[in-house]
Amino acid sequence: LKLSLMLTELLKLSLKLTELLKLSLIETELLRLSLIDTELLKISLILTELLKLSLIDTELLKLSLIETELLKLSLMETELLKLSLMLTELLKLSLKLTELLKLSLIETELLRLSLIDTELLK
């Protein structure tokens, strides 16, 4: 009977040990899942950094577009300056033409006076 009681106790202890082993297995699985979770977090951080880099790249592209627009505006400004120089030259020519017209008017007046003079001499 004593042996039977001891055997029963041993069986109980064995059951408890089995339960402890099951719990240990569960704990091991939880640790493995925790490691996987840690890896996923690392990947998530890497993805976040990639997104940040993508945003920076997008901003750089925007800046590049702005720079392109500024270059276009600069080219337009250069063309406007060329046109302004042409206009200045045209104005100079117009002034010379005005002077020529004044001289022509003086010449016409001299011719008229000469005709009057000729008429008076007759």
Image (tube, rainbow, N blue to C red):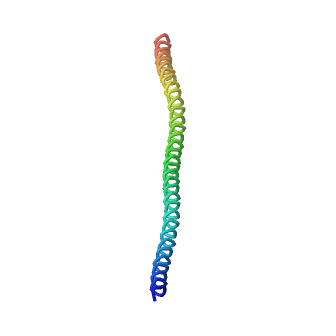
Towards the viewer: 24 or 63? 24
User: For the point 48% across and 52% down, which residue is it?
Assistant: 52
Q: Position of residue 87 (x, y in %)?
A: 51, 31
Q: Residue extending furthest top? A: 121
Towards the viewer: 115 or 37? 37
Q: Where is residue 12 in the image (x, y as percent from the top left)?
A: 45, 82
User: For the point 52% across and 55% down, which residue is it?
Assistant: 46
Q: Tell how many labels.
A: 0
Q: Residue extending furthest bottom? A: 1
Q: Position of residue 64 (x, y in %)?
A: 53, 44
Towards the viewer: 86 or 96? 86
Q: Position of residue 16 (x, y in %)?
A: 45, 78
**In the image, residue 13 above or below residue 41:** below
Q: Residue extending furthest front? A: 2
Towards the viewer: 6 or 88? 6
**In the image, residue 43 above or below residue 121:** below
User: For the point 53% across and 60% down, which residue is it?
Assistant: 39
